Image (cartoon, rainbow, N blue to C red):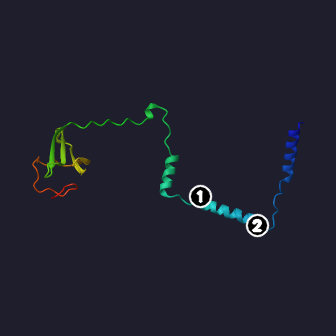
Amino acid sequence: MSQKLQLLQRQMLRREQEQAPPPEGHGLGTAIEKLIADEVERRVGEAVERQPPARVQRLLDQQFAKPPMPTDYRQLPPVPAIKKPMPPITSTVTRRDHRGRILWFDSVAEGGSPVWRTEVLGRDELGCIRSLRTVLLDGPPLPADDAVLRTPRKIFGNDQE
């Protein structure tokens, strides 16, 4: 046998001999170990009985309750229907301020529905539009009024004398 193998064999024998004997059934050390084991078991039992918060439980349920992978094309969900594109806009109704700048405009598609209102939310110091908001209106658009308003509403960016 080589020297390395002999060295390993001696180390293994020494380790086997150095193992401590099992603790006896009485004494202070045994009582402390028993107290520690009982406390650990009690805390583990409490943690198992306690429910996690609803949000965590929902995430756990989603993670472990995944549907099985389909093995046949008939098990696949149906393909979602393709939405029709918006019909072309046929008319636009605008509202302007005292300087002739557009405040908002309504866009009417073919057939009169839907009606989209686009409002100007902000302009820069030169009067160029910087932000818009587009919403879907429930009712018909307001009548056309491209005339300049004589009594403008107070809107961000309106400079009064």
**Going 67% across and 61% down the picture, which residue do you hit?**
40
Q: Is residue 88 left or right of residue 35?
A: left
Q: Label 1 belongs to which residue?
A: 48
Above or below, comparing residue 90 to residue 125 in the picture: above
Above or below, comparing residue 143 to residue 46 in the picture: above
The three-letter code of the residue at mark 1 reads Val
Q: Nearer the viewer, residue 160 or 148?
A: 160
Quarter of the rendering containing residue 90:
top left
Residue furthest right in the image: 1
Q: Between marks 1 and 2, how big is the CA–CA gap?
A: 26 Å
Q: Nearer the viewer, residue 129 or 65?
A: 129
Picture coordinates of residue 134 (x, y %)?
25, 47
**Going 87% across and 51% down the picture, which residue do you hit?**
17
* Helix, strand or loop for disc 2: helix
Query: Which image quarter holds the C terminus?
Result: bottom left
Instruction: Decide if residue 134 is in sight here.
Output: no
Picture coordinates of residue 65 (x, y %)?
51, 46
Quarter of the rendering containing residue 47:
bottom right
* Helix, strand or loop for disc 1: helix
Residue 73: assigned label? none
Picture coordinates of residue 52 (x, y %)?
53, 58
Mark 1 or mark 2, earlier in chain: 2
Q: Label 2 belongs to which residue?
A: 31
The three-letter code of the residue at mark 2 reads Ala
Picture coordinates of residue 43 (x, y %)?
63, 62
